[in-house]
Image (cartoon, helix red, strand yellow):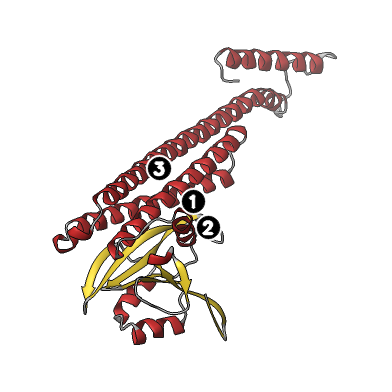
Amino acid sequence: MFVTNGGFYMRKFLCCRDNFAEKQAWQKYCWVNIEMPTEEDTLYLTRDLKIPSAFLSDIRDVDERPRIETEDGWTLMILRIPYRDEGNDIPYITVPLGIIMKADYFVTICHHATDMLPDFIRYMQRKKLPIDGSWDLLFRLFLSSSVWYLKYLKQINNQSRAVEKELERSIQNAELQRLLKIEKSLVFFITSLRGNDNLLVKLKNLKSQREFFDPDLVEDVEIELRQAQDTARIYSDILSGTMDAFASVISNNLNIVMKLLATVTIVLSIPTMIASFFGMNFDVIPLGHNPYGFVITIVITLLISLLVALFFRKKNLF
């Protein structure tokens, strides 16, 4: 880690042949890992390492899709990795991780402070796993990204279950909006995982580099990537079905309320109608001169209303 006048920025030189020990400057077998690059980092990459500036622009694009490209002897690979953004409405998104390779150089650039890269470094240091060249490191990063997709998918599933329990108690718009945001996260994951899968297929078809691949490691990457894709699709289908079910419940509850209101309106309209008859401006009104006329009218009105209410109750409309 280096310090500039503007504060801290993350540029690390990690020696792959020395258990990822951090060095002060680049040397052979060093991995240059840059998170949230500054202008000074950009100058170092373009001026000192001679990396094409177009590569850096592509990595900066938050919507850049996974792909592989070669220019001036440099190879650029863009991998979509999961990222938890607590300050965003959508809790889980994916961001591009740029991987640039040439001979002894291996550079990764990410414009977000992700959990994946620091965890990957700690894991490699703890396990003391040997790295046999740049392609081996590339596939291990690929494997780590798939593992982190699965980690976040478990968190998404737990959040979905918590929201579903709240919805079972009381259906509120806030809970439905939370489910909608989680569904958007799953869409991001599914799209990015599909792009990563296409990138993996292209890498496997690089005949000139195939001799440097570890077959077991590539197989592990395929398994984890397929599992992440299947899990994301399953959770997305379950969540879509859950939202459809709750939407049906809301619609059914609305119909019940409307039916109840219509029934109450009909029952209450009977006293109103009878009262309107006796309010007509006629000389002769039934029971108009009877001293018990008012009481008789009230009793008859209540009886008719009660009979109508019992009828609706028998028809399960009450």
Is residue 213 or residue 264 the one in the foreground? Answer: 213
Q: Quadrant of residue 39?
A: bottom left
| Dot 1: element | helix
Give the residue drawn at x 30%, y 84%.
Answer: 50
Q: Earlier in the sequence, mark 2 or mark 3?
A: 2
Q: Residues within 10 Å of mark 3 (few under 14, many from 20)?
A: many
Mark 1 or 3 closer to N-term? 1
* Mark 1 surroundings within 10 Å by alpha-carbon count, few (fewer than 14), some (14 through 19), many (20 or more): some
Residue drawn at x 31%, y 71% is 100
Asked whether residue 258 is in view, the answer is: yes
Q: Amino acid at mark 1?
A: Lys
Circle 2 residue: 89
Give 251 or 129, whichever is nearer the viewer. 129
Real-space Cα distance between discs 2 and 1?
Answer: 7 Å
Task: Depth check: give the residue in front, 223 or 276.
Answer: 223
Q: How many marks?
A: 3
Outermost right residue: 291
Q: CA distance from mark 2 to mark 3?
A: 18 Å
Q: Are marks 2 and 1 in contact (CB under 8 Å)?
A: yes
Locate residue 209: give its quadrant.
bottom left
